[in-house]
Image (cartoon, helix red, strand yellow):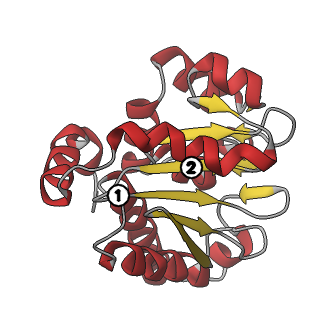
Amino acid sequence: MDIDWTDGTAVLRLDHGLNAFEATFVDELHAALDVIEANEEGRALVTVGADKHYSNGFDIDFLGSLDRSDLAAFMDTTLRVLARLLTFPVPTAAALNGHAFGVGAMLALAHDRRVMRPDRGWFCLPEIDLGMQFHPFMLALIRHRLPAAVAEEAILSGRRYDGAAALAAGVVHDTAPLDDLVETAAAQVAPLTGKAAAIAVVLKQQLHAPVLVHLGA
């Protein structure tokens, strides 16, 4: 993962293939957030994927290779990176350059703002078609971020939202072509910048308490 800095905004480029959630991807994401959080001059964070994926969700083959205890440990690490973004000390925006599926969609929802391309990529929660349940933290995150009717539709239908549909449904805050995607995402969080990190974290913890209470559940 590469980090570029522009006027205090960290642009974190997720470039681990499909950006599927497995041990290496999650560890690298945690490490990148360590670097960004350590920069006292940082004012905002924008994450963006590569090629046609923002994140393709869980690596199912990887999950299938884990025994019960290792799976529980990996899920805990995954939930904690989502929680970390949810309470990050600077404003965050997800620039959805392509597909955001499953936990990849939840990664986007963990950001303060979301921007999506109008011409490529889907936002989708396909768990119903995969026969998978949601961890209570994940379900709480989805319900916390999406309008009630949209959350129900997304969960029970597995609908694939393109940029226009995602904007109309309130899944994302704006759409922009690929060349303008990161800049548009940064503009979305610009009004939230310049606040003291310590109080921002505390207020985010209070604001998102209905989600965070499920850590370790």
Indicate whether 188 appears above or below 204.
above
Q: Position of residue 191 (x, y in %)?
A: 37, 37
Indicate whether 164 appears above or below 79.
above
Residue displayed at 32% across by 70% down: 41
Indicate whether 209 appears above or below 154.
below
Is 50 left or right of 168, judged from the image as shown?
right
Q: Position of residue 71 (x, y in %)?
A: 49, 76
Residue displayed at 33% across by 41% down: 192
Q: Position of residue 214 (x, y in %)?
A: 27, 51
Crowding at dot 2, Cα within 10 Å, few <14 / some 14-19 / many 20+, comes out as: many
Residue displayed at 16% across by 44% down: 203
Element at badge 2? strand
Q: Quadrant of residue 39?
A: bottom left
Of residues 188 and 201, the one nearer the viewer is 188
Q: Quadrant of residue 152?
A: top right
Element at badge 1? helix
Residue under numbered circle 1: 83
Is 212 left or right of 119, judged from the image as shown?
left
Q: Which mark is residue 186?
A: none
For marks 1 and 2, the one nearer the N-term is 1
Of residues 64 and 11, the one nearer the viewer is 11
Judged by depth in the image, the label closer to the viewer, 1 or 2, is 2
Residue under numbered circle 2: 94
Q: Quadrant of residue 20?
A: bottom right
Is 74 left or right of 23, judged from the image as shown?
left
Crowding at dot 1, Cα within 10 Å, few <14 / some 14-19 / many 20+, comes out as: many
Look at label 1 and name its amino acid.
Ala
Q: Position of residue 81 (x, y in %)?
A: 41, 66
- Tell me if residue 131 can be seen: no
Of residues 91 and 214, the one nearer the viewer is 91
Look at label 2 and name its amino acid.
Ala
